[in-house]
Image (tube, grey):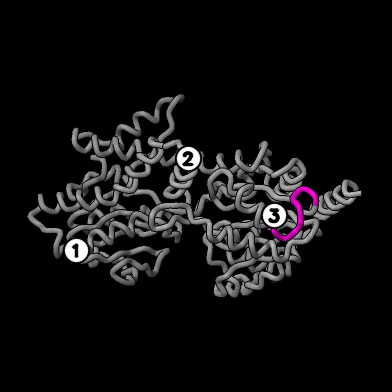
Amino acid sequence: MAGYERGVTLLRLEEKIRDKSATIGIVGIGYVGLPLAVAFAIAGFKVLGFDIRQKNVDSVNRGKSYIADVSSDSLSSVVTGKLLEATTDQSRLGEADAICICVPTPLTATKDPDLSYVIQESEAISKYLRPGQLVVLESTTYPGTTKQVVLPNLESSGLRCGIDFYLAYSPERVDPGSKDHNVKNTPKIVGGIDPQSTQLTQLLYSQIAGTVLPVSCPEVAEMTKVFENVFRSVNIALVNELAHLCERMGLSIWEVIDAASTKPFGYMPFYPGPGIGGHCIPLDPYYLANKARELDFHTRFIELAAEINEHMPYHVVSRILEVLSTRSKSLNGAKVLVLGVAYKEDVEDTRESPALKIIQLLREKGAEVSYNDPYVPQIHVPAGDMESVELSGECLASMDCVVIATDHSCYDMGEVANRARLVFDTRGATRGLKHDNIVRLGE
């Protein structure tokens, strides 16, 4: 009889997903959750977005997007069509047939994984869990989280995975600000606790993604996510270290990369910069390293790469100090303008942005620092809040040094070079310009 009931529960959920009568719950409507919620709503599902931030809930329900990857027009369309609603009321989790957990997974002050949001939300879901629901964790984490953390919390409800409810991991693969990659054309990886969970999760995501790839278990899906970003961290660290060496040898790392990129096989270009930012690349190495230590294994190569990348803001400030000194100018009291504080170009996301660390370090050395970023009107640094200043010819000319920390496409680098006394370019944004007042990282 139990097997019969289990089969009926599975078939009912499959049918609801196929005919799009299933309600989708998205827990955490930020950079990952909101695009996912809109994608499901556009596909024809009723979507409930859950968030602890009342301002985000209110903004969604007004059809006003706060995420660059989601236009207010598309958001407003699904809200007006009553396909998407946001709420802070977690008692409504029971209304959802499938629940996707998209909450932050930051680091603690000691760089240990902070799963408090995942724990908090899985405990909340367990209070309202009912037979016939599918739960999918999307948050970046270390291998084992779905099975060792989320599963016990959900089964504390008295329901059993694979019998009463289903559980899987499917890593988010969001590239903020990308015009080429989105939910639809980026393959989804899914790994369930059991074959039925994998099957349901694959069916669910196939409604919004062109390609859905099942793997054998949640741990493989979790490892896939951290490996993707550790791969980038390690290669960025390599090119950052080569940038240091090129500076000492009087070579241009940018020219070296351009030359190496002509090789049609066995090479992939990565570029130096002022450090790494965003939610994933600065954090994932520590999630993996922490898990490895539990197994008495030390990921020395991966941890060294993270250290190299974290040191880059310090190196940038050291170079600025050196360049100013060659012009008989002290960094103490110098007027410095930082262009761009988002962690990458053409987004408003400042999470883990190296520009914020650069500003902090410059101020600690006595510089008078201001910044401009058309995407970020205000930032908070240890010394207090700062507001973006107007970028004008007069502003540029009044600075002792202009630091290109983020190469937003709206910046006219030729105008910056023409107006500024000194430009320190951390992104290679001025390549092709021959101005004597330009100094580049890695040269």
Q: Nearer the viewer, residue 326 or 141?
A: 141
Q: In front: mark 2 or mark 1?
A: 2
Q: What is the spatial separation of the Cα atoms under label 2 and label 1, in whole angstroms?
A: 41 Å
The vertical placement of 220 against 157, above or below, is above
Label 2: how many residues lie within 10 Å, few (<14), some (14-19) or many (20+)? Answer: some
Q: Give the main secondary structure of the magenta stretch.
A: loop
- Residue depicted at 66% across the width and 53% down the height: 152
Residue depicted at x 23% and y 53%: 317
Q: Which residues are magenta?
A: 154-163
Which of pointers 1 and 3 lies earlier in the amino acid sequence?
Answer: 3
Q: Amino acid at mark 3?
A: Val
Which quarter of the image is occupied by the C terminus?
Answer: top left
Q: Considering the numbered disc 3 on the image, is that residue within a helix, a strand or a loop?
A: strand
The residue that label 3 is drawn on is 135
- Give percent across and percent down for residue 333: 14, 65
Depth check, front residue: 109 or 420: 109
Q: CA distance from mark 1 to mark 3?
A: 50 Å
Which residue is label 2 attached to? 292
